[in-house]
Amino acid sequence: MERKAVLDRAITDTPTISKIAYIDGRGEDLWDAIVARNMEGIVAKRKDGRYHTDKRTNDFIKVIYYTYADVHIAGWHKGDFG
């Protein structure tokens, strides 16, 4: 997390640059907040993970909060197109 501390000291938020918020060690609390606000999900990065410009790795994962709805279709009629 030393890298984050260096970035926090070196970069100030501006209208065109903003630091991405992070939460260390409280992933379950973050997830509970995501669910409570009905948000899409989170992207998590391994602390020891590296950034790669040329490939995807398992160092980042996207955790999606899926929501579902019951849908009932009462009728359907194929119309003429074109």
Image: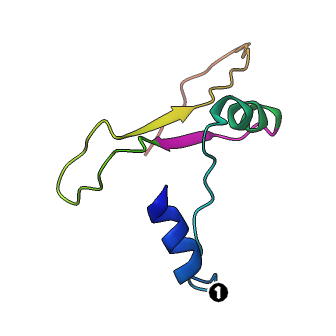
Residue 33, image x, y percentages? 78, 37
Depth check: 31 or 65 in front? Answer: 31
Q: To which quarter of the image does residue 52 belong?
A: bottom left
Residue 3, image x, y percentages? 44, 64
Depth check: 76 or 82 in front? Answer: 76
Q: To which quarter of the image does residue 77 belong?
A: top right
Q: What residue is pinned by disc 1? A: 15
Please say if 60 is above or below 21. above
Q: Is residue 7 left or right of residue 38?
A: left
Q: Residue at x 63, y 59 (%)?
A: 21
Q: Which residues are magenta?
A: 37-44
Please say if 4 is above or below 59. below
Depth check: 65 or 6 in front? Answer: 6
Question: Furthest-left residue in view?
Answer: 54
Colour approach in the figure: rainbow
| Secondary structure of the residue carrying numbered label 1 | loop
Q: Residue at x 58, y 70 (%)?
A: 19
Q: Residue at x 73, y 13 (%)?
A: 72
Q: Residue at x 62, y 26 (%)?
A: 66
For mark 1, does the 10 Å Cα neighbourhood hold few (<14), some (14 to 19), or many (20 or more) residues? few
Question: Furthest-right residue in view?
Answer: 36
Count of marks, rendered view = 1
Looking at numbered disc 1 in the image, what kind of residue is underneath it? Answer: Pro
Q: Is residue 81 left or right of residue 56?
A: right
Depth check: 53 or 75 in front? Answer: 53
Residue 51, image x, y percentages? 29, 56
Q: To which quarter of the image does residue 26 belong?
A: top right
